[in-house]
Image: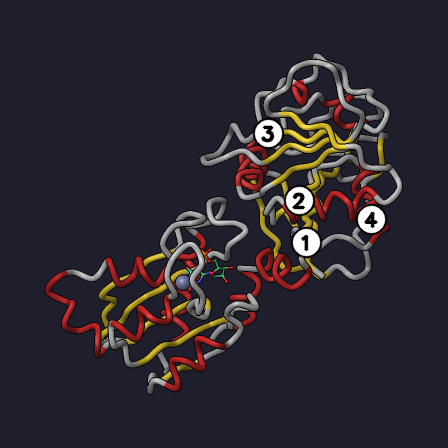
């Protein structure tokens, strides 16, 4: 098992290719190895479509097919046990007579939850588990939260100046540089929903779409308890699926839904609605008041702070990173430094 970590790392790389396309499913990668050579690899590409293991087996060349019953299957997640949108991967492994399986994470989905590992072992398959388990959990932190807490994974994001301001008061203020703009749109493409408060909707008139990266745009969500967002705002242009938390408007909308949630307790109510509509990652883009409500309620899983070296001198103060936050990643993009905290 000395080689196990490198093949599991390869599974993680493959899994990551599903980012933005598979939620609320996990990102999963699988690699088939015979005698130190990868003979097949695959990943879960799109929600509702084939699982990683199926794609790895399909990828094996005709000439290598006879090697499958002597190969080792590496999976970033325990193979599934259930008939979901696809047949159980555990049965595929038994049909293909794969003799050894190496897994990073046990699948926390109650429909799986160790049952596949047991079934494989009962059938005489050699199973090794928990290889790079912490790394696997970090990769699929949104999925683990979704399954175990039955709510979306909440990501708070803001950009701040060197002197700790997120904007000049009352005007749209560019804080971070062009490379970060692209990264932000990548984050949007990997989120299922994106939220702003009323003040941000009014001062920035944001589109909240993904137009600077590949892939999809998330569901747009805006707080509008007092119906202050003007009809001319991009958020009310009906161009993308949008939830407005506030009173209904009279026009004919096709993509825009008005949700009457009471301003007290709106965060758990919104998270519940997102959960029920199978949206597993919520990105909160501001502003300070809305971000602060999430930190005050303790309802956050991750915080991404973009730090720019310029000074603003005055403006709206950045939210405070809560004491429970733990720095997980730090990297530069142009002049900006990005820090990712989890709990
Ligand atoms: C695997 N390999 O690549 C993935 C798995 O609705 P379905 O059929 O797509 O099933 C979704 C569940 O299957 C998901 O909640 C998780 O437990 C597991 N995902 N399992 O063996 C994969 N994506
Ligand atoms: Zn499966």
Q: In which quadrant is the N terminus drawn?
A: bottom left
Q: Quadrant of residue 264?
A: top right
Q: Residue at x 37, y 71 (%)?
A: 90
For label 4, count other residues whose C-alpha is less than 10 Å away and answer few (under 14), some (14-19) or many (20+). few
Secondary structure under badge 1?
loop
Residue 309 seen in the figure: no
Q: Looking at the rendered structure, which numbered label has been put on residue 320? A: 4
Secondary structure under badge 2?
helix
Q: Looking at the rendered structure, which numbered label has been put on residue 241? A: 3
Left or right, 241 with respect to 171, comes to left
Residue 206 in picture, x, y percent from top left: 67, 24
Instruction: List the residue tagged with mark 1.
Output: 151
Mark sitting earlier along the chain (2/1)? 1
Q: Quadrant of residue 343?
A: bottom right
Is the CB–ligand 1 distance for label 2 below 8 Å?
A: no
Q: Residue at x 81, y 55 (%)?
A: 298
Mark nearest the camera among 1 and 4 is 1
Residue 46 in picture, x, y percent from top left: 42, 47
Q: CA distance from mark 2 to mark 3?
A: 13 Å
Q: CA distance from mark 2 to mark 1?
A: 7 Å
Secondary structure under badge 4?
loop
Residue 304 in picture, x, y percent from top left: 67, 47
Mark sitting earlier along the chain (2/3)? 3
Q: CA distance from mark 3 to mark 1?
A: 20 Å
Instruction: List the residue tagged with mark 2.
Output: 274
Q: Residue at x 58, y 33 (%)?
A: 181
């Amino acid at each position: 098992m000395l080689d196990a970590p490198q093949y599991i790392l390869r599974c993680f790389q493959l899994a990551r290719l599903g980012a933005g396309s598979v939620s609320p499913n996990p990102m999963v990668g699988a690699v088939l190895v015979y005698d130190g050579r990868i003979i097949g690899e695959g990943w879960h590409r799109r929600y509702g479509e084939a699982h990683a293991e199926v794609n790895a087996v399909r990828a094996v060349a005709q000439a290598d097919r006879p090697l499958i019953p002597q190969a080792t299957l590496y999976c970033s997640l325990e193979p599934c046990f259930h008939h979901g949108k696809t047949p159980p991967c555990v049965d595929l492994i038994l049909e293909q007579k794969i003799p050894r399986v190496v897994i990073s994470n046990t699948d926390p989905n109650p429909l799986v939850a160790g049952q596949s590992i047991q079934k494989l072992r009962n059938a005489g398959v050699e199973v090794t588990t928990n290889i790079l388990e912490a790394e696997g959990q970090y990769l699929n932190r949104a999925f683990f939260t979704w399954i175990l807490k039955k709510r979306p994974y909440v990501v708070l994001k803001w950009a701040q100046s060197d002197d700790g301001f997120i904007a000049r008061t009352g005007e749209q203020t560019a804080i971070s540089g062009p490379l970060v703009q692209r990264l932000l749109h990548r984050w949007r493409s990997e989120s299922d929903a994106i939220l702003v408060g009323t003040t941000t909707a009014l001062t920035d008139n944001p589109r909240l779409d993904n137009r600077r990266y590949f892939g999809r745009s998330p569901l747009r969500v805006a707080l509008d308890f007092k119906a202050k967002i003007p009809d001319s705002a991009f958020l009310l242009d009906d161009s993308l699926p949008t939830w407005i938390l506030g009173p209904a408007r009279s026009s004919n909308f096709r993509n825009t839904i008005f949700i009457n949630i009471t301003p007290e307790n709106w965060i758990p109510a919104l998270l519940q609605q997102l959960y029920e509509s199978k949206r597993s990652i919520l990105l909160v883009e501001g502003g300070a008041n809305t971000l602060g409500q999430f930190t005050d309620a303790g309802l956050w899983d991750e915080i991404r702070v973009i730090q720019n070296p310029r000074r603003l001198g005055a403006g709206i103060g950045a939210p405070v990173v809560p004491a429970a936050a733990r720095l997980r990643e730090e990297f530069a993009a142009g002049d900006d430094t990005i820090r990712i905290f989890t709990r």
